[in-house]
Image (cartoon, helix red, strand yellow):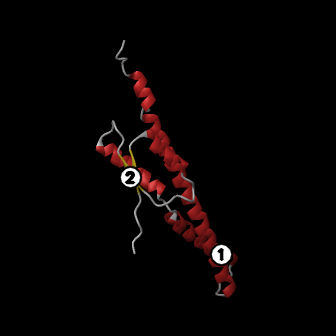
Amino acid sequence: MRAKKHVMTITDQKQLESLLNAGIFDRPMLTVDVQLPGRNEIENQLLASKLNRYYNACGCGDGKFFIVLALIVFFAQGLGRGDLTWSWYYAGVAFLYCLAGAFIGKTWGQLRAYHKLRKTIREELAKTPSDEVVGSLSPDPSG
């Protein structure tokens, strides 16, 4: 059974701002489609690509990196002490190092993606004029 794919189409600034309300660890899987007016198709696709990458990031890549880093630290400590022999104790400690590395890596990846998502949205909101500003800049038809 395949999971349903939820799609959010962003057509104005308020919908883009609604992505800022997403939590760090409780974001539902979502595909973002951007169709902002006043932008060409390529700009909308590039923004959608960034938003999808950061919104749906799980931190797995960073988790893998930190697991490998934890194993390197474990073996470097064992070689430094000169007592790197097989025992269930050392296997358990190596497992705990990997577990800590995975947790730190996943958390780091999630936080980094969350901050990149917020930065991307804020930069986009700063570039795109709001509807109120556009309305106030248009000439008054009565005057």
Image point (35%, 45%), residue name:
35
Which is in the foreground here, disc 1 or disc 2? 2
Near-viewer residue (78 or 121): 121
Q: Callout 2 environment at 10 Å: few (<14), some (14 to 19), or many (20+)?
A: some
Image point (54%, 59%), residue name:
109
**Residue sitting farthest toward the left:** 41
Q: Callout 1 environment at 10 Å: few (<14), some (14 to 19), or many (20+)?
A: some
Closer to the chain start, of discs 1 and 2, is 2
Q: Amino acid at mark 1?
A: Leu
In this rendering, is residue 67 above or below 120?
below
- Give the CA separation, mark 1 to mark 2: 36 Å
Near-viewer residue (22 or 102): 22
In this rendering, is residue 86 above or below 57?
below
- Which residue is identified by label 1? 96
- Which residue is identified by label 2? 49
**Residue sitting farthest toward the bottom:** 87
Near-viewer residue (70 or 29): 29
Residue 105 horizontal/vertical position (percent):
57, 64
Q: State which quadrant residue 137 falls in.
A: top left
Q: Which quadrant holds the C terminus?
A: top left
Residue 36 horizontal/vertical position (percent):
36, 41
Relative side of 110 to 82, left or right: left
Q: State which quadrant residue 97 falls in.
A: bottom right
Image point (52%, 47%), residue name:
20
Query: Do labels 1 and 2 touch, CB within 8 Å?
Result: no
Residue 129 horizontal/vertical position (percent):
42, 32
Under circle 2, the secondary element is: helix
Image point (59%, 61%), residue name:
107
In this rendering, is residue 3 above or below 28?
below
Residue 58 horizontal/vertical position (percent):
50, 62
